[in-house]
């Protein structure tokens, strides 16, 4: 039993290992979780270190603050080639961030550059994460790994590092998105990971006769697997959502659970948001939220008219997000009383389709094809409703942010969308938004029309829902406590052993 768990009240030590973290580097929801959950855990009596690669794309203003904590050479690959591991550190609001420095692996620019080089990159990253914990003599109670990029950590932990100080740690692996798994030729992974041949078997890393799967191996070796909503935890055990790992996940289901994400309620606070035209809260949104609608319409060249319903979409433009459904109904949504704002980048097919609609519908449709956090804030505040019709959605953050900003979500009942958006029930006057079930454009249109009907005919009901949504607890607190309970459960195994 480790000293730092000798009594229930002692502070738990948790190391987070993942490939991105706001504000240093973020491409999606994973970056938000890596930022917000450690901060919430600090408030729950934990010490947290976040381990990240030192990518070249991390802005100078952050790099300049990093302090050198040491370096060493580490062997990697089947041949035992050695590589430099530097540790650059910064502390922000009580969370320690350790960046692993190595130019060969992390100087490519963006975090993800292509699977061929990403596989070696994240083999090195996973192993170096454990090596730096030993080097820093900071042994966590729990190592919490995120997605496939950190999924070799459990394997290294239980092999190379098992009899080293860090080997005492328990390990949790969280699935943020099962679509990406780190699959490559067996020889490629064998070479770069340097992991023993015995792990390249079907129950662990082997995917098929030719390929290995990093995520699969990590899931087999983790003490606990979590994913970011209860519904997604169920869904991934079925062929429709399991991305070919449904059998593996069903087998490991006794150690699988779902804990829904929260959002950082300080970062996302309509009452104190410098990026808005007017701040507002659940008490005064009726007068003030519309100032943001006006500012949004002005900024994007939409007809300035507070009586139009403004429907927003903030998303990576990929198939996952249900954009083919949106595409199919845009002409039917634009009925003279509706304006649509799309903010996103991604698949050129969708970018071009949305550009086309803007061209055809100047003044009522805006396609802002870019990644723009400032505009995202204004859309969350200025729109009346937000579309999230995803094909699958492990948790989804945009519906949570929308609710916090009093913007009614219109979502498909899948994953975290189902767990966080209670459908509107007119009879009981309850619910947080409008929902639809099967993946079908007509059903999405029905949900949009139901939203419009309420908006245009019973605005006081709509406003009651806005107030309900703004007051809904979407913070990290409850989720952080659920993670803590999980950590405590596995930390206690040491005592039982
Ligand atoms: P995913 O991680 O699958 O992309 P999530 O809903 O979990 O989806 O998280 C998306 C996050 O990225 C949210 O914080 C959202 O506001 C932000 N986001 C997505 N697209 C853009 C964009 N084009 N500009 C600014 N922020 C965006």
Image (tube, rainbow, N blue to C red):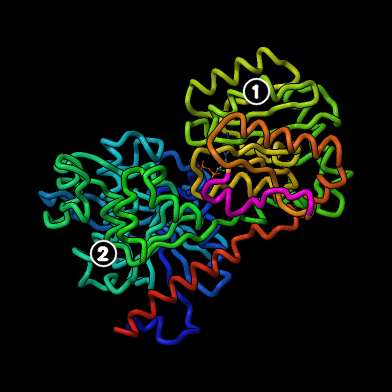
Ligand 1 within 8 angstroms of badge 2 C-beta: no
Residue 466: x and y, percent? 78, 48
Q: Within 10 angstroms of label 2, few (less than 14), some, or many (20 or more) residues?
A: many
Q: Is residue 261 magenta?
A: no
**Residue found 58% across the figure and 37% down from its top:** 389
Q: Which label sits on residue 376? A: none
Q: Is residue 423 magenta?
A: yes
Q: Within 10 angstroms of label 1, few (less than 14), some, or many (20 or more) residues?
A: some
**Residue found 34% across the figure and 39% down from its top:** 107
Which mark is first along the chain, 2 or 1?
2
Image quarter in which the C terminus is found: bottom left
**Ligand 1 found in image quarter:** top right
The kind of secondary structure element at disc 1 is helix
What count of labels does the image hold?
A: 2
- Residue 453 placement, left or right of 23: right
Front-lying residue, 3 or 188: 188
Identify the residue position indicated by label 1 in the image: 330
**Residue found 42% across the figure and 60% down from its top:** 226
Q: Is residue 195 visible?
A: yes
The quarter holding residue 311 reads top right
Residue furthest toward the bottom? 7
Q: Which contiguous range is marked in magenta?
A: 413-427
Instruction: Tell me the mark number nearer the camera, choosing from 1 and 2.
Output: 1
Task: Establish if 349 lies above or below 392.
Answer: above
- Residue 495 placement, left or right of 79: right
**Residue found 60% across the figure and 15% down from its top:** 356
């Amino acid at each position: 039993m480790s000293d730092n768990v000798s009594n229930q009240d002692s502070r738990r030590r948790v190391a987070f290992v993942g490939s991105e973290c706001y504000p240093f580097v973020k491409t999606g929801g994973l970056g938000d979780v890596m930022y917000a959950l450690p901060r919430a855990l600090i408030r729950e009596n934990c010490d947290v270190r976040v381990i990240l690669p030192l990518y070249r794309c991390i802005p100078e203003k952050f790099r300049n603050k990093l302090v050198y904590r040491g370096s060493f050479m580490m062997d990697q690959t089947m041949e035992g080639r050695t590589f430099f591991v530097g540790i650059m550190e910064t502390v922000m609001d009580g969370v320690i961030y350790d960046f692993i420095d190595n130019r060969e692996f992390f100087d490519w620019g963006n975090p993800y550059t292509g699977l061929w080089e990403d596989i070696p990159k994240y083999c090195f990253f996973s192993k170096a994460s454990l090596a730096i914990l030993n080097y820093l003599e900071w042994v966590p109670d729990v190592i919490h790994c995120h997605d496939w990029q950190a999924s070799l950590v459990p394997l290294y932990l239980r092999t190379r590092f098992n009899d080293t100080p860090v080997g005492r740690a328990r390990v949790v692996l969280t699935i943020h998105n099962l679509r990406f798994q780190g699959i490559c030729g067996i020889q490629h992974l064998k070479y770069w990971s340097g992991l023993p041949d015995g792990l390249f078997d079907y129950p662990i890393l082997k995917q098929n006769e030719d390929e290995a799967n990093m995520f699969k191996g990590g899931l087999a070796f983790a003490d606990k697997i979590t994913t970011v909503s209860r519904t997604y935890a169920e869904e991934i055990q079925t062929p429709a959502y399991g991305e070919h790992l449904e059998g593996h996940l069903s087998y490991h289901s006794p150690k699988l659970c779902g804990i829904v994400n929260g959002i950082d309620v300080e970062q996302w606070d309509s009452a104190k948001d410098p990026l808005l035209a007017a701040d507002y809260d659940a008490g005064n949104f009726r007068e003030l939220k519309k100032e943001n609608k006006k500012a949004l319409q002005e900024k994007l060249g939409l007809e300035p008219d507070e009586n139009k319903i403004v429907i927003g979409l903030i998303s990576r433009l990929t198939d996952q997000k249900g954009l083919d459904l949106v595409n199919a109904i845009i002409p039917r949504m634009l009925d003279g009383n509706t304006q649509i704002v799309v903010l996103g980048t991604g698949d050129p097919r969708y970018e071009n389709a949305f550009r086309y609609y803007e061209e055809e519908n100047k003044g009522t449709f805006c396609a802002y094809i870019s990644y723009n956090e400032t505009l995202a804030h204004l859309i969350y505040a200025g729109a009346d409703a937000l579309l999230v019709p995803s094909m699958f959605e492990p948790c989804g953050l945009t519906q949570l942010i929308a609710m916090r900003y009093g913007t009614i979500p219109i979502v498909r009942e899948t994953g975290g969308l189902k767990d966080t958006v209670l459908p509107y029930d007119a009879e009981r006057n309850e619910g947080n938004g409008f929902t639809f079930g099967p993946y079908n454009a007509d059903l999405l249109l029905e949900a949009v029309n139901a939203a419009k009907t309420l908006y245009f005919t019973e605005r006081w009901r709509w406003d009651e829902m806005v107030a309900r949504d703004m007051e809904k607890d979407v913070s990290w607190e409850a989720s952080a406590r659920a993670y803590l309970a999980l950590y405590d459960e596995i930390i206690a195994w040491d005592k039982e052993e």
